[in-house]
Image (tube, rainbow, N blue to C red):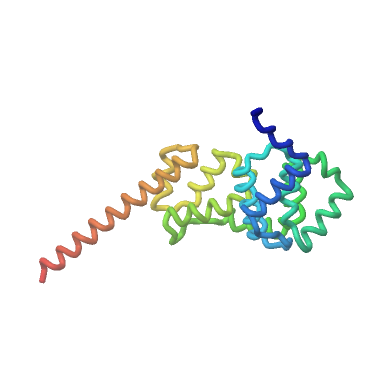
Amino acid sequence: MPPPAPPPEKSESEQTLDHIAKFVKLMPTLFEGGPDPLVVDSFMDRVKKHLNAMNLALDRLKIILVTYNFTGDAEIWWTTMSHTHNVDTITYDAFKKLFYEKYFLVPKKRKLKKEFDGLKQGNMTVTEYENKFTFLLRFMPEIAKNEEGKTEKFIEGLDFSIRPIVTVAKLIEYAKAMRKALVVEAKSKDRKAIKESYKHSRSMGAI
């Protein structure tokens, strides 16, 4: 018997529907719009994760999938954009630029930039400081892309008990500066623990 004929190749629209079904299954969350940068950034972070998992190459398909999850104000906005922009040829980077211009409002950007500019370690551990630094850095792409500038800013905000030692190391790579700060912090804690232990043993001996 002759081998069974291969199934007919799906049309472009059928393939698109398959991708939409897969994307919605991976990411059921809808985006309604609104000025909260945390909601906007969280939505786009999840979008990036799932688009990468699907390994899509076509910008047009990526845009179709993302905007399929728009509802409310976001859906109305994108409908308006489709009348003023050629959405069939727009790149995904250009789409993201339009998206962030709409939903990542200037006053929110200024507030986050001010918080980032004034960020200091203070009473935080190095890990806690680094977590907050990384979070705010997501909203500062011009700094995030500059490895040396990012590292300098991170070191600048470290506690004075740590900063001079890290500064002397003259590190320009962010990961190395962070590891150095963690090492300095750990050694400082060890010294404090030894000192406290010594004080305790002397006080016990004096009894």
Question: Up-down: is 159 above or below 5?
Answer: below
Q: Position of residue 167 (x, y in %)?
A: 44, 42
Q: How many marks?
A: 0
Q: Is residue 36 left or right of residue 177?
A: right
Q: Position of residue 40 (x, y in %)?
A: 67, 57
Q: Quadrant of the N terminus?
A: top right
Q: Position of residue 120 (x, y in %)?
A: 50, 56
Residue at screen point 15% across, 63% down? 201
Residue at screen point 47% across, 41% down? 175
Q: Residue lying furthest front in this view?
A: 1
Nearer to the camera, 151 or 161: 151
Q: Residue lying furthest right in this view?
A: 83
Residue at screen point 67% across, 54% down? 24
Question: Up-down: is 110 above or below 84?
Answer: below
Task: Answer whether residue 111 is visible to the viewer in this image.
Answer: no
Nearer to the camera, 139 or 111: 139
Q: Residue lying furthest top in this view?
A: 2
Residue at screen point 81% across, 57% down? 77
Q: Position of residue 104 (x, y in %)?
A: 71, 56
Q: Quadrant of the C terminus?
A: bottom left
Nearer to the camera, 55 or 84: 55
Task: Answer whether residue 124 is visible to the viewer in this image.
Answer: yes
Nearer to the camera, 69 or 136: 69
